[in-house]
Image (tube, coloured by chain):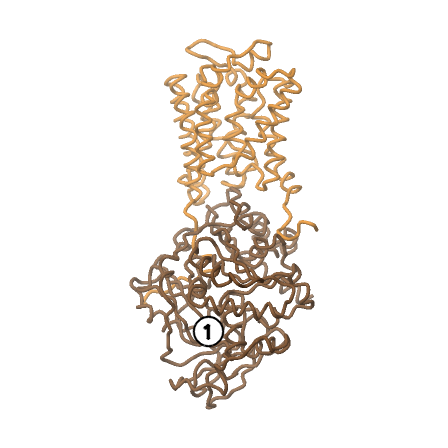
Chain colours: A brown, B orange
C-alpha cells in the first residue's frame, strides 16, 4: 500500500522473466528495408525519394504530411527499390518506401557528432526533434515535436518519463533503463530545458527494482529529476493512469496531458531525443522484445527501423513450437499479425509469439453481470452497460454512458468470466462514433 | 508455418476465472449449510436437496433441447438455483412442491426471459415466493425431530425471547439451509476470500437491518442481534442478495441496494403479515435494480466534476 497507482486494473501473467535478463543485442538487417509512410498518429508522410534513388543512413525519405505528422528517416544506405503498398502491423496496406540495403551504412554528413544542447533555443530543439522523425515509441506514436510544443510551456510542471512498462512480456523499456539509462537522463534534461518550471519524474513499476535502483543512482545529483516507483498493475503505464499516479491529477479523453500540466514520454522516446539533440542521430532504431513461449530464445534487440519481423524471429532462434498467435506488441494491447512480412516501425515494441491462443480456446457465453469489468475498468465506466449499447449499435447511448472515455486497455475483456469480447466491441463503437462526428 | 495464425482483436490473454468457476465456488460455499441442514433435519432434507436440484437442471436441459438452444447446464447456474430453492424449503416438505418450484424457477423466471443473465428476479427466490403464496400452509409449517415447532422469528413476534447460541449454531426449526449461521458464515467467508462476492451488499444489508431493528424494535441490543441471526437474513444477504444477475453492478448501486433491502426487511419483519420478510425484500429489491443502476451510473475517470 501507499505506492502511487490508480483504481482498477488487472494483474495478468507478466511473462517478463523470459527476456528481462537478456542484454540488448544489435541486429543488423539482411534483406530489404520497408519504411511505412504512416507509422505515427496523424497525416501520412510524403515520400521524398523515387525508385532508383541512392539513400544514406539518416536521410529523410518521408516528409511530415501535415501539422500532426512525422518525418521518416532511412536507417541504412543503398538504393530505393520502389514505393509500394505493404501490410503493416496494424493490418492496413500502407504506402512504403522499399530500400535495398548495400550493407555499407554510409551516413549523411555530420551524423553522430556531439552537440551541446545548452546552447540551443527551444525552437531549435523542437526543430531537431521534428527533423529526426521522433514519435512516441511506447505505442500510440504521437509525433514528439507536437507533444513537446504545448500552447503554454510555462504551465507544464511535470515531465513524466514512462518507464512503467505494464504490458505483459515486454522488457524493452526495462533494458533501455538498465543499459541506456544515461541517455534517458540526458534526454529528459533536454526536455526540461523546454519547460523551465517543470520537474522531471521517471515512473517505474516496482516489479523492476533493478531499474528503479539504477535510475535513482543516475539522477542522484539532478535536482530537477526524481524516480517515482509505481505499483505493479496493468495499465499503470497508460497516459491517464500514469499522470494520476504521479501527480494526482485526472484527465479525460478530451484533454491532453498538457491540460494537467504534464508531458509524458516513453523512456525509449526520451533516449531518442538525446540521440537526436546531443548526438546528431535521427530516429534509426528502436528496442524490440522478441518473446513468448513459442520462440526459441526470447531476447531484446536494437533493431533498425524497416527490418522485417521475420528477421527478428530468426534472430531469436526461430520457433521452438508452432505459434498459434503472433502479436506486434504485448498481449494486452498488441496487434495480432497475419504473417511476419511486416516491417519494424516506430511503435513496434515487441514481437510476442504464443503457442496457444487463449481467445479462440473459449467461446463467449452469456453475461452474468458479475461486475468484474466495472471493478477493473481504469476509466471508471461500466463496460457491461456499454456492451449492451454496442450490441444494439446504439451510438448515442454509448456516448452517453461515456464510452468515449474507454482507453481500450483490455482489462474488461481480460477479466470477463464469460469471455465476452468487450474491448473489441468498444473499439468498433469508438471508431463508428468518431466517424459519425467527422461527418458532422 | 503451415497452419493459419489466429488473428483477433486485443487483448490476447484472458483471466483463468470463468463463469463455471464462479458458479462452482457458490455451490461449494453452500455445502456447509446444506450439510448442516441434512445433519440437523435428517434424510428427507437430503432428498429435498437432491430432487430440487435435479428438477432445476433437468428443466433447463429439456427446455434448451426443445428450443434448439445450446445446453448450458454445465455452467452450474441451474444447480445453484436448485440448491438455493431447496435450502429455502421446510425440511418436511412433500417433494412435489420443490419440484414444481424448480420447474417454475427455471422455465418461467429464467428461461422465458432469455436464460442466464436475462432474468430480472432471482429464479430460486421467485419460485419460493410463488410456492409461499400457493401453498402457504405447507411452506410455513416447520418441524423439528418430527414435532411441529414455531420458528424463533414467530416466537419473537409473540414476545418471547430467543437463545442466541442456538440461533447461531442452528439447533432451531427453520428452512433446511437458513438455520446454522455458523455454516453459512463459513461459506460466506469462502466467497469473500475467493472474491466471488464483495462485502458491499451483505454488509450494508445486515448493518442497515440491524440499525433499523434497533431503532424501531425497542432499542434492545439482544433483540436486534436475535433478529439478525433469526430467519433467512444471513442466508439471504450472502447468497441471494449477492446474485450477480439480479443485483446492481455499480459499487454505489450495491450499497444503495443493501440499504434498501435492510429497511424493507425491517419493515416486513416488524409490521408485515408474516414474521419473515427476507425473500420478499430481495424480490422487491430485484425489481428496482434497473432504477438503482440508472441513478448510480459512475462518473468516468477525469469527468468527476462535470
Q: Position of residue A115 (x, y in %)?
A: 53, 79
Q: Position of residue A252 (x, y in %)?
A: 63, 56
Q: Secondary structure at mark 1?
A: strand
Q: Position of residue A290 (x, y in %)?
A: 38, 65
Task: Residue at the far left: name it.
Answer: A320
Place residue A14 in its image quadrant.
bottom left
Give the chain of mark 1: A
Residue receiving disc 1: A87
Q: Give whichever of B299, A276 is nearer the camera.
A: A276
Left or right relative to B10: residue B223: right
Total marks in image: 1
The N terminus of chain B, quarter of image: bottom left
- The answer to whether one can see residue B40 in this image is yes
- Near mark 1 (Cα within 10 A), the count class, few <14, some 14-19 or many ≥20, is some
Q: Position of residue A355 (x, y in %)?
A: 34, 59
Residue A158 sits above or below residue A307 on the image: above
Q: Give whichever of B82, A157 is nearer the camera.
A: A157
Name the residue rendered at 60%, 64% in the picture: A263
Residue B38 sits above or below residue A140 on the image: above
Place residue A148 in its image quadrant.
bottom right
- The answer to whether one can see residue B10 in this image is no
Amino acid at each position: 500500500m501507499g505506492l502511487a497507482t490508480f483504481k482498477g486494473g488487472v494483474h495478468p501473467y507478466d511473462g517478463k522473466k523470459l527476456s528481462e535478463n537478456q542484454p540488448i543485442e544489435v541486429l543488423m538487417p539482411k534483406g530489404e528495408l520497408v519504411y511505412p509512410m504512416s507509422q505515427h498518429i496523424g497525416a501520412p508522410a510524403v515520400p521524398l525519394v523515387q525508385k532508383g534513388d541512392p539513400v544514406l543512413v539518416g536521410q529523410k525519405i518521408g516528409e511530415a504530411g501535415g501539422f500532426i505528422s512525422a518525418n521518416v528517416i532511412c536507417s541504412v544506405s543503398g538504393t530505393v527499390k520502389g514505393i509500394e503498398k505493404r501490410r503493416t502491423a496494424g493490418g492496413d496496406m500502407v504506402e512504403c518506401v522499399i530500400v535495398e540495403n548495400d550493407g555499407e551504412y554510409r551516413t549523411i554528413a555530420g551524423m553522430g557528432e556531439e552537440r551541446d544542447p545548452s546552447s540551443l533555443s527551444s525552437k531549435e530543439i523542437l526543430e531537431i526533434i521534428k527533423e529526426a522523425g521522433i514519435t512516441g515509441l511506447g505505442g500510440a506514436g504521437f509525433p514528439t515535436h507536437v507533444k513537446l510544443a504545448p500552447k503554454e510551456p510555462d504551465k507544464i510542471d511535470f515531465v513524466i518519463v514512462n518507464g512503467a512498462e505494464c504490458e505483459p512480456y515486454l522488457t524493452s523499456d526495462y533494458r533501455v533503463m538498465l543499459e541506456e539509462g544515461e541517455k534517458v537522463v540526458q534526454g529528459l534534461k533536454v526536455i526540461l530545458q523546454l519547460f523551465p518550471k517543470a520537474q522531471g519524474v521517471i515512473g517505474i513499476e516496482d516489479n523492476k527494482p533493478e531499474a528503479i535502483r539504477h535510475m535513482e543512482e543516475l539522477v542522484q545529483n539532478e535536482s530537477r529529476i526524481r524516480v517515482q516507483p509505481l505499483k505493479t498493475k496493468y495499465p499503470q503505464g497508460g497516459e491517464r493512469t500514469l499522470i494520476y499516479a504521479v501527480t494526482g491529477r485526472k484527465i479525460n479523453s478530451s484533454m491532453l496531458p498538457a491540460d494537467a500540466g504534464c508531458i509524458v514520454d516513453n523512456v525509449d522516446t526520451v533516449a531518442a531525443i538525446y540521440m537526436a539533440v546531443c548526438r546528431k542521430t535521427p530516429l534509426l532504431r528502436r528496442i524490440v522484445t522478441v518473446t513468448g513461449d513459442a520462440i526459441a530464445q526470447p531476447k531484446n534487440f536494437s533493431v533498425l527501423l524497416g527490418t522485417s519481423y521475420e528477421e527478428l524471429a530468426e534472430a531469436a532462434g526461430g520457433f521452438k513450437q508452432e505459434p498459434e498467435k503472433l502479436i506486434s506488441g504485448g498481449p494486452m494491447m498488441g496487434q495480432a499479425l497475419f504473417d511476419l512480412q511486416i516491417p519494424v516501425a516506430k511503435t513496434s515494441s515487441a514481437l510476442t509469439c504464443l503457442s496457444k491462443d487463449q481467445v479462440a480456446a473459449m467461446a463467449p457465453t452469456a453475461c452474468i453481470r458479475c461486475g468484474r469489468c466495472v471493478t477493473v475498468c481504469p476509466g471508471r465506466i461500466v463496460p457491461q452497460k456499454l456492451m449492451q449499447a454496442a450490441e444494439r449499435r446504439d451510438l448515442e447511448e454509448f456516448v452517453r454512458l461515456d464510452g468515449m472515455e474507454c482507453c481500450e486497455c483490455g482489462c474488461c475483456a481480460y477479466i470477463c468470466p464469460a469471455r465476452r469480447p468487450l474491448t473489441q466491441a468498444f473499439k468498433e463503437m469508438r471508431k463508428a462514433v468518431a466517424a459519425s462526428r467527422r461527418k458532422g | 508455418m503451415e497452419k493459419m495464425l489466429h488473428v483477433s482483436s486485443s487483448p490476447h490473454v484472458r483471466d483463468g476465472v470463468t463463469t463455471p468457476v464462479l458458479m462452482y465456488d457458490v455451490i461449494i460455499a453452500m455445502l456447509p449449510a446444506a450439510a448442516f441442514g441434512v445433519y440437523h433435519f435428517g434424510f428427507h432434507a437430503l432428498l429435498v436437496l437432491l430432487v430440487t436440484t435435479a428438477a432445476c437442471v433437468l428443466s433447463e436441459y429439456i427446455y434448451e433441447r426443445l428450443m434448439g438452444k445450446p445446453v448450458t447446464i454445465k455452467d452450474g447456474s441451474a444447480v445453484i438455483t436448485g440448491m438455493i430453492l431447496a435450502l429455502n424449503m421446510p425440511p418436511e416438505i412433500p417433494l412435489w412442491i420443490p419440484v414444481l418450484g424448480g420447474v417454475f424457477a427455471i422455465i418461467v423466471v429464467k428461461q422465458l426471459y432469455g436464460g442466464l443473465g436475462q432474468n430480472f428476479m432471482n429464479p430460486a427466490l421467485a419460485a419460493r415466493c410463488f410456492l409461499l403464496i400457493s401453498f402457504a400452509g405447507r411452506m410455513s409449517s416447520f418441524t423439528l425431530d418430527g414435532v411441529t415447532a414455531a420458528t424463533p422469528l414467530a416466537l419473537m413476534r409473540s414476545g418471547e425471547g430467543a437463545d442466541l447460541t442456538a440461533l447461531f449454531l442452528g439447533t432451531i426449526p427453520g428452512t433446511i439451509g437458513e438455520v446454522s449461521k455458523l455454516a453459512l458464515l463459513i461459506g460466506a467467508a469462502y466467497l469473500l476470500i475467493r472474491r466471488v462476492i464483495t462485502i458491499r451488499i451483505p454488509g450494508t444489508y445486515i448493518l442497515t437491518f440491524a440499525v433499523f431493528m434497533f431503532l424501531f424494535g425497542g432499542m434492545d441490543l439482544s433483540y436486534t442481534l436475535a433478529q439478525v441471526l433469526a430467519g433467512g437474513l444471513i442466508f439471504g444477504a450472502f447468497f441471494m442478495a449477492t446474485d450477480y444477475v439480479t443485483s446492481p453492478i455499480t459499487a454505489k448501486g450495491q450499497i444503495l441496494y443493501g440499504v434498501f433491502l435492510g429497511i424493507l426487511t425491517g419493515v416486513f419483519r416488524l409490521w408485515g403479515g408474516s414474521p419473515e420478510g427476507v425473500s420478499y425484500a430481495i424480490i422487491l429489491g430485484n425489481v428496482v435494480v434497473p432504477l438503482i443502476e440508472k441513478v448510480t451510473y459512475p462518473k468516468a475517470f477525469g469527468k468527476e466534476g462535470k
